[in-house]
Image: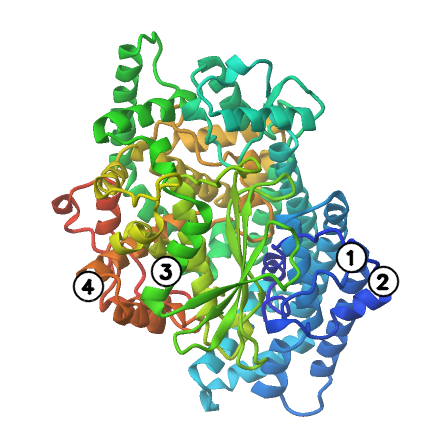
């Protein structure tokens, strides 16, 4: 049950989707709009019909759905028959369908196309949803029925997926607090409500600090080095923000900003970087520091109620890594080589600055400008020239879709008959290898102020044999949109991201589960990024690349030597590229490792700053030159939902280990073949959250995962230096928590 009876944190995690396009036509009364959510959509694949409801429908729809769900739970509790798998576990799984429909659409929109009204609704409804989830997961009568089935499991005949559903339902309720005392359960409810309110507020504040606070420049000279289209976009944004004649650059979600390398004016670079680095830390109108302090303290208090020393120990119960120490040891083994790489690369960049006539040492706002210059000279690589080979629609249709056809036998058909929540959204029917309809894909590529930063995938409809549903999936990106009339080119980073997010989509499309709560990407946080990362490897696979990488003017296929340069250059600048991610992951674990007493002591904005600074300094990395990918004040992954990636940002590194080892397997076994694709689909992509993750990987690769390919790919070690670094019993637990 994705939004039904699992822990309230899991309920809230489902609520991450998008907002709704304004409706031009006249809609029926609100009560009729609410009734839309009571039944399955009549559109193909039960896709949501955005023409059937307005923003006014959400609050009454949520309230109605929660009442219906509560009545369904009461029926399960009051069933006079003895608890069974069907009348308790499956009944719970199938409850709350209307609530899932409402939440899926609403939270899709608050992520992708929000409005002030939707934000206000989110603020109002999130604590109510949390309380509703808690009322279910912490109900002692309901838990008694679940426990009765769980305790009798040895005597029952179940499929492996049935057994997994029973285990997940029971353990989810225990993790929510079902075994606590009455007083402790009430305290959990209070903490959950407070966390829901604070994390919603943090997410909205962090987005406002990004989208509502562009960086203004007085003259065109400030933006020297940027393209004419970038400068025009900056002028248009300044005019839109009420300062015609000036220039404005919108911030993106990461600390580093994509336009910095092109900016020749060093003072302008510093201004843009510092605006990004200091966003939401009180330097301007937004300050999230006390929200962070309160969230950290409440999480530590909640963990203590469960007898855990800190939030990380509590939150990692269902992870592949299982224990904080496992994740920390995994990351910390990379720090010495990474620190040396940072110092070496910083010296190279400072040397380049001196050669360029500069009398200063490299700073973060200089780093990528000179790193790109060295990369261009060392590898003869011109990033702007590379970009001219990547036209967005060709990247998607002739690249990503072509990869899916060659590897898995899929085909795609563009459609224009489905309502969408924004005019920029593209839709496709996806056909399986046998020609049958597999699902529907929505693609929302462009950056806009109403969209949170980053890129993500989720479902409008989950695959489920029990419900007879096929997946309806969307990918959301934040590619800067080209001016009207210009060809939409994308950077190679966005090419990689497009392949990555569609890897998530394939994980969802290939779901083959009976139960929606175990379907597709419903896996552990430190496993879910793995299939998406693997699919990045095909972005530069020769036969795929030659099919989509065509020069936008000449139609010439990207030269092999240019790709060789891209791949060779990929190991350069790992001091920053890899360092900022490692720092963010370790910073997350520091916030998640606080005891209640330690967290309570961080009670002022200045102490939040001091804790972040001390935590980063302890890492032993060059944090002043390479700040974390996200500072605490805008670290949405870990502070903008009750669960999210808190104590889990390390997942990107953990899954990169699985990814790089899997790439090695593909290459050793013939690369891009249907046989390999079908094998990966059968052993990983179709398994959802139904089995142990170490076992799943071993079924695919025939062995335990090995960290060596990851370190080699990052250029941190040579093969012989990591010969003894195989991940085995000594380094990692032999099995996952699930």
* Mark 2 vs mark 1, CA separation in Å: 8 Å
Badge 1 marks a residue whose secondary structure is loop
Q: Position of residue 647 (x, y in %)?
A: 48, 49
Residue on which disc 3 sits: 402
Precedes in sequence: disc 2 or disc 1: 2
Instruction: Answer with mark 3 or mark 2, whichever residue precedes in sequence.
Output: 2
Disc 4 to disc 2, how far (Cα)?
57 Å
Closer to viewer: mark 1 or mark 3: 3
Q: Earlier in the sequence, mark 3 or mark 4?
A: 3
| Residue mark closest to the camera, 3 vs 4 | 3
Which of the 4 quarters of the picture holds residue 282? top right
Front residue of 126 and 270: 270
Of the numbered discs 1 and 3, the one sitting upstream in the chain is 1
Instruction: Report which residue position mark 4 lands on.
Output: 670
* Mark 1 lies on residue: 54
In the picture, the disc for residue 30 is: 2
């Amino acid at each position: 049950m994705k939004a039904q009876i699992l822990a309230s944190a899991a309920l809230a995690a489902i609520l991450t989707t998008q907002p709704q396009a304004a409706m031009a036509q006249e809609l029926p009364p609100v009560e009729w709009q609410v009734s839309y959510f009571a039944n399955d959509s009549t559109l193909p694949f039960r896709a949501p019909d955005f023409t059937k409801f307005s923003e006014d429908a959400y609050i009454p729809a949520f309230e109605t759905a929660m009442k219906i769900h509560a009545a369904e739970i009461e029926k399960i509790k009051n069933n006079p028959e003895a608890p069974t798998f069907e009348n308790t576990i499956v009944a719970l799984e199938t409850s709350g369908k209307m609530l899932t429909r409402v939440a899926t659409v609403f939270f899709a929109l608050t992520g992708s196309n929000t409005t002030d009204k939707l934000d206000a609704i989110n603020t109002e409804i999130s604590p109510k949803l949390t309380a509703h989830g808690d009322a279910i997961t912490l109900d002692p009568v309901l838990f008694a029925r679940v426990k009765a089935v769980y305790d009798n499991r040895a005597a029952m005949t179940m499929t492996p997926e049935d057994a997994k559903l029973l285990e997940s339902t029971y353990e989810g309720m225990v993790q929510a607090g079902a075994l606590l005392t009455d007083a402790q359960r009430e305290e959990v409810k209070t903490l959950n409500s407070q966390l829901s309110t604070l994390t919603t507020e943090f997410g909205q504040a962090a987005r406002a600090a990004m989208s509502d606070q562009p960086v203004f420049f007085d003259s065109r000279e400030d933006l020297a080095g940027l393209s004419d289209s970038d400068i025009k976009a900056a002028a248009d944004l300044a005019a839109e923000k009420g300062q015609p004649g000036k220039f404005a650059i919108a911030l993106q979600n990461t600390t580093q900003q994509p336009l910095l390398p092109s900016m020749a004016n060093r003072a302008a670079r510093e201004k843009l970087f510092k605006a990004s680095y200091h966003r939401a830390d009180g330097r301007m109108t937004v300050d999230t520091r006390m929200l962070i302090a309160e969230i950290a303290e409440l999480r530590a208090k909640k963990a203590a109620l469960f007898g855990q020393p800190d939030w990380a120990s509590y939150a990692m119960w269902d992870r592949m890594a299982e224990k904080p120490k496992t994740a920390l040891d995994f990351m910390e083994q990379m720090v010495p080589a990474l620190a040396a790489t940072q110092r070496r690369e910083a010296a190279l960049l400072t040397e380049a600055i001196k050669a360029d006539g500069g009398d200063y040492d490299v700073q973060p706002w200089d780093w990528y400008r000179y790193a790109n210059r060295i990369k261009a000279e060392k590898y003869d690589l011109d990033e702007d020239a590379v970009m001219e080979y990547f036209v967005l629609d060709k990247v998607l249709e002739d690249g990503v879709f072509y990869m899916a056809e060659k590897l898995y036998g899929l085909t795609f058909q563009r459609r224009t008959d489905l309502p969408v929540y924004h005019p920029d959204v593209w839709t496709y029917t996806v056909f399986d290898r046998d020609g049958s309809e597999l699902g529907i894909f929505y693609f929302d590529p462009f950056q806009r102020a109403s969209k949170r930063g980053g890129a993500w995938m989720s479902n409008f409809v989950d695959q489920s044999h029990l419900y007879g549903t096929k997946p309806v999936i969307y990918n959301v990106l934040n590619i800067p949109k080209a001016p009207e009339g210009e060809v939409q080119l994308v950077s190679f980073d966005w090419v990689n991201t497009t392949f990555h997010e569609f890897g998530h989509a394939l994980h969802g499309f290939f779901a083959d589960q009976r139960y929606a709560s175990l379907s597709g990407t419903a896996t552990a946080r430190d496993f879910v990024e793995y299939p998406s990362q693997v699919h990045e490897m095909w972005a530069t696979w020769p036969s795929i690349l030659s099919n989509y990488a065509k020069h936008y003017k000449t139609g010439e296929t990207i030269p092999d030597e240019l790709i060789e340069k891209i791949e060779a250059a990929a190991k350069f600048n790992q001091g920053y590229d890899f360092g900022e991610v490692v720092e963010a992951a370790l910073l997350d674990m520091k916030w998640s490792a606080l005891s209640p007493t330690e967290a309570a002591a961080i009670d002022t904005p200045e102490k939040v700053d001091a804790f972040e600074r001390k935590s980063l300094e302890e890492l032993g990395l060059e944090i002043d030159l390479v700040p974390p990918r996200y500072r605490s004040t805008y670290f949405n992954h870990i502070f903008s939902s009750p669960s999210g990636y808190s104590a889990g940002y390390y997942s990107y590194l953990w899954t990169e280990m699985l990814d790089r080892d899997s790439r090695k397997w593909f290459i050793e076994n013939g690369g891009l073949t249907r046989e390999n694709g079908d094998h990966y689909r059968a052993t990983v992509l179709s398994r959802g959250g139904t089995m142990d993750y170490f076992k799943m990987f071993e079924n695919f690769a025939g062995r335990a995962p090995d960290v060596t390919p990851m370190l080699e790919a990052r250029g941190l070690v040579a093969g012989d230096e990591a010969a003894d670094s195989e991940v085995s019993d000594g380094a990692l637990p032999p099995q996952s928590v699930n």
